Amino acid sequence: MSLTVNGKPVGPIDVPNDMMMLDFLHDYLNLTGSRFGCGQGICHACTIILDDPVEGAVEMRTCVTGAHFFAEKRVRTIEGHATRDAKGDILQLTPVQQAFIEHFAFQCGYCTPGFVTGTQVLIERLRKTPIARADVEKTIEQALAPHICRCTGYVRYYEAIRAVILSTPGLVSG
């Protein structure tokens, strides 16, 4: 199997046919930021971004999607969001990551990679199709509702997401 992960080609690698993508990321690439939460695709802690050539950024749950589904595709994990130097050191966080820190939008942090990833997908969608200011709350709720936080950190998550949307030019009209 070959694919592109965080902008870098990976493979070809022999991967068992029944291996889930989350296990491939953890065991083969040592990318452990996406979390195994429920193992049933319900909590979205395992979410990564599939860069679809037609749809753009799409959230994908990796605990229920086989690694081979991603063959020849481009994906981004939570490790690939920030800008890094050649050694891999972080140079700059994304606006989403920075807002989550500024709003202390995490408690235990287990679900945070999924929320950050889901928010990044939302931001990229809004760049293509801005929304009215009056629709911000509803849009956040619809986009992030599938993500589950056991610590009930939703208030701070949503505050951070709202801040990014409202402070990023071109995402909101009116």
Image (cartoon, helix red, strand yellow):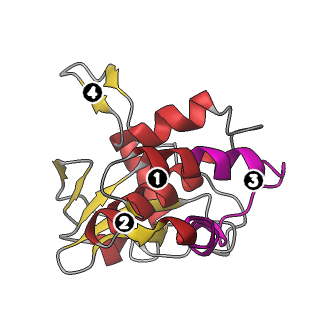
Q: Distance between the residues labelled 4 and 2?
A: 25 Å
Identity of the amino acid at label 4? Arg
Mark 1 vs mark 2: which is more N-terminal?
2
Task: Establish if 159 lies above or below 143.
Answer: above
Q: Give the side of residue 12 with respect to residue 96, left or right.
A: left
Mark 2 vs mark 3: which is more N-terminal?
2
Stretch of the chain drawn in magenta: 136-160
Quickly name the residue at label 3: 154
Residue at the outermost front position: 174
User: For residue 126, which numbered disc appears in the image?
Assistant: 2
User: For residue 165, which numbered disc appears in the image?
Assistant: 1
Identity of the amino acid at label 2? Leu
Image coordinates of residue 128 in percent, x first then y, are 26, 69
Identity of the amino acid at label 1? Ile
Local crowd size for mark 3, using a 10 Å CA cut-off: few (<14), some (14–19), many (≥20): some
Q: How far apart are marks 1 and 4 (CA)?
A: 24 Å
Q: Closer to the camera: disc 4 or disc 3? A: 3
Q: Give the side of residue 171 with respect to residue 43, left or right.
A: left
Q: Do the residues labelled 1 and 2 touch (CB within 8 Å)?
A: yes
Q: Which residue does the image show at 26% across and 79% down from the upper left? A: 55
User: For residue 146, which numbered disc appears in the image?
Assistant: none
Local crowd size for mark 4, using a 10 Å CA cut-off: few (<14), some (14–19), many (≥20): some
Q: Which residue does the image show at 55% across and 72% down from the upper left? A: 135
Q: Do the residues labelled 1 and 4 touch (CB within 8 Å)?
A: no
Mark 4 vs mark 3: which is more N-terminal?
4
The C terminus: image quadrant: bottom left
Prevailing secondary structure of the magenta residues: helix
Image coordinates of residue 74 in percent, x first then y, are 23, 63
Task: Establish if 21 lies above or below 78.
Answer: below
Identity of the amino acid at label 3? Tyr
Considering the numbered disc 2 on the image, is that residue within a helix, a strand or a loop? helix
